[in-house]
Image (tube, coloured by chain):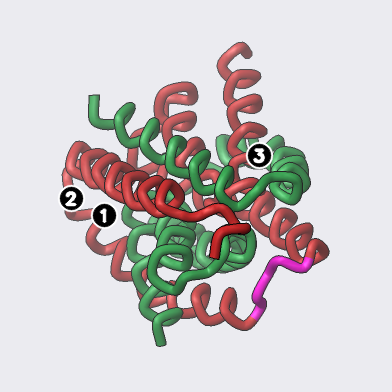
Chain colours: A green, B red
Amino acid sequence: MRLVVIGLLAGLFSALLGVGGGTVVVPLLILVVGWEERPAMATSLAAVALISLVGAVTYWFHGEVKPAAAAVVGLPAVAGAVAGTALQQRLANRTLSIAFAALLAALGVRMLV
Amino acid sequence: MWALLAAGALGAVAGVLAGLFGVGGGILFVPTLTLVLGLTQIHAEATSLLAILPAAVVGAWRQRAYGNVRTRAALVIGLAAIAGVEGGVQIAEELPQHVLRRLFAVLMLIVAAQIAWRAARRRPSYAS
């Protein structure tokens, strides 16, 4: 049941902010459900694949997706994702949490100023 | 040309963040699409959802090989999100873009504080 609510919130914020929902799913799995970082982040990424598929299709029919721009940033990201998942296996959960928090804080501050 | 190379490089970094943190990379895709490629906020948010897709699929496949993915939970979360996505799209088209940016920023800060607080409080594993 908690997972359903997390999914609903993730989908809402995904479409609202274009973030794929992971920024909602990972914190909720860690803070509310109490999962360790690695399964939380890995499961989030799998959910994000589904969420972004649905979001992209929905926006596509609203005519707001730019496929060329998506390819420019999205194709290099595939290689990055392989490297990122490999790196994650070598880091402690606490390190992952602190790095994740720093990333979110930096992005939040940058978008406020 | 330089803008395309910069966008590609930022896309690769977004992919690393996606694989590392499971966030899909949109937190970097959206600013790249607006600031480097000049898309509007709405177009960038829509486009980032397509851009995330191949990296999320490949990253999740790798994480499954590492044994970290809880498949049933991922399916439940992903499918529940479908209803949420449709609601979010309706709201997004009715909100001014600067409000979307503020919402995004405030959400980041709240979440960051909570995660850092939890990690800082956690005892080392040898202390029970």
In the shown orientation, is residue B80 left or right of residue A76? left
- Alpha carbon of mark 2 to alpha carbon of mark 3: how far? 31 Å
Query: Which residue is identified by label 1?
Result: B92
* Mark 3: amino acid: Val
Query: Which chain letter matches label 1?
Result: B
Q: Residue at x 74, y 50 (%)?
A: A89
| Dots 1, 2 in contact, CB < 8 A | yes
Q: Residue at x 38, y 70 (%)?
A: A32
Tell me the magenta residue range. B67-71
* Mark 2: amino acid: Leu
In the shown orientation, is residue A21 left or right of residue B19? left
- Alpha carbon of mark 1 to alpha carbon of mark 3: how far? 28 Å
At which x and y percent is residue B1?
A: 63, 13
Q: Residue at x 41, y 87 (%)?
A: A1
Query: Which chain letter matches label 3?
Result: B
At which x and y percent is residue A47?
A: 56, 67
Tell me the quarter of the picture where residue B7 sits: top right
Q: Residue furthest right?
A: B65
Query: Which chain letter matches label 2?
Result: B
- Which label is found at residue B16? 3
Report the label total.
3
Residue B6 colored in magenta in the image: no
Mark 3 surroundings: few (<14), some (14-19) or many (≥20) residues within 10 A: many
Give whichever of discs 2 and 3 has the lower sequence position.
3
At which x and y percent is residue A2?
A: 40, 81
